[in-house]
């Protein structure tokens, strides 16, 4: 955010000043002040890691969920996080963003 952004004075209809933030969430998409997808990609990767941790805890070589149940968990619990809003945001994602999400997606798929 450039120095000009700090000088912007936006007010509500009742005169209260609108607070400036570095990131905002809108319809599940994390938007940074610079309008890049960096913040959203970080959020997606973090959420996938947290959900993959749950999958690891529920899997064991001699105990835990059956393989088909584990696959269903992956398809319904982890995969949607990676795919949310990709159709709309795809053109805004850099090649590095796509690589990072695809790498985490592949890591999660290997858990199945």
Image (cartoon, rainbow, N blue to C red):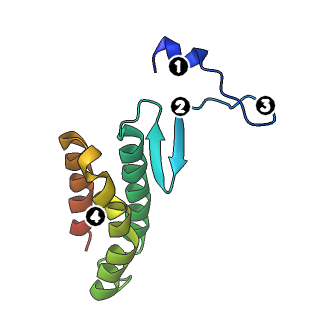
**From mark 1 to mark 4, how far is it between C-alphas?**
40 Å
Q: Which label sits on residue 22? A: 2
Q: Earlier in the sequence, mark 1 or mark 2?
A: 1
User: Residue 100 at x, y = what percent?
Assistant: 24, 47
Q: Is residue 10 above or below residue 73?
A: above
Q: Secondary structure at mark 2?
A: loop
Q: CA distance from mark 4 to mark 2?
A: 30 Å
Mark closer to the chain start, 1 or 4: 1
Tell me the distance, in whole angstroms, between the alpha carbons under discs 1 and 2. Answer: 11 Å
Label 3 to label 1: alpha-carbon separation: 18 Å
| Residue under the point 39% across and 53% down | 44
- Please tell me which of labels 3 and 1 falls first in the chain: 1
Where is the C terminus found, in terms of image quarters?
bottom left
Give the residue at x 28% y 84%.
67
Q: Which mark is residue 101?
A: none
Label 2 crowd bin: few (<14), some (14–19), many (20+), radius 10 Å: few
Residue at mark 3 to residue at mark 2: CA–CA distance: 19 Å
**Closest to the observer: 75 or 8?**
8
Is residue 62 among what the camera can see? Answer: no
Callout 1: helix, strand or loop?
helix
Q: Secondary structure at mark 4?
A: helix
* Element type at mark 3: loop
Q: Earlier in the sequence, mark 3 or mark 2?
A: 3
> Of circles 4 and 2, which is in front?
2
């Amino acid at each position: 955010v450039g120095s000009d952004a700090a000088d912007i004075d936006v007010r509500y209809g009742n005169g209260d000043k609108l607070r400036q933030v570095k990131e905002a969430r809108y319809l599940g998409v994390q938007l940074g002040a610079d309008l890049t997808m960096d913040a959203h990609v970080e959020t997606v990767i973090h959420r996938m890691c947290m959900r993959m941790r749950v999958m690891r805890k529920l899997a064991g070589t001699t105990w835990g969920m059956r393989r088909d149940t584990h696959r269903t968990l992956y398809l319904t619990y982890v995969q949607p996080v990676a795919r949310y809003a990709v159709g709309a945001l795809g053109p805004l994602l850099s090649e590095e963003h796509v690589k990072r999400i695809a790498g985490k997606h592949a890591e999660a798929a290997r858990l199945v």
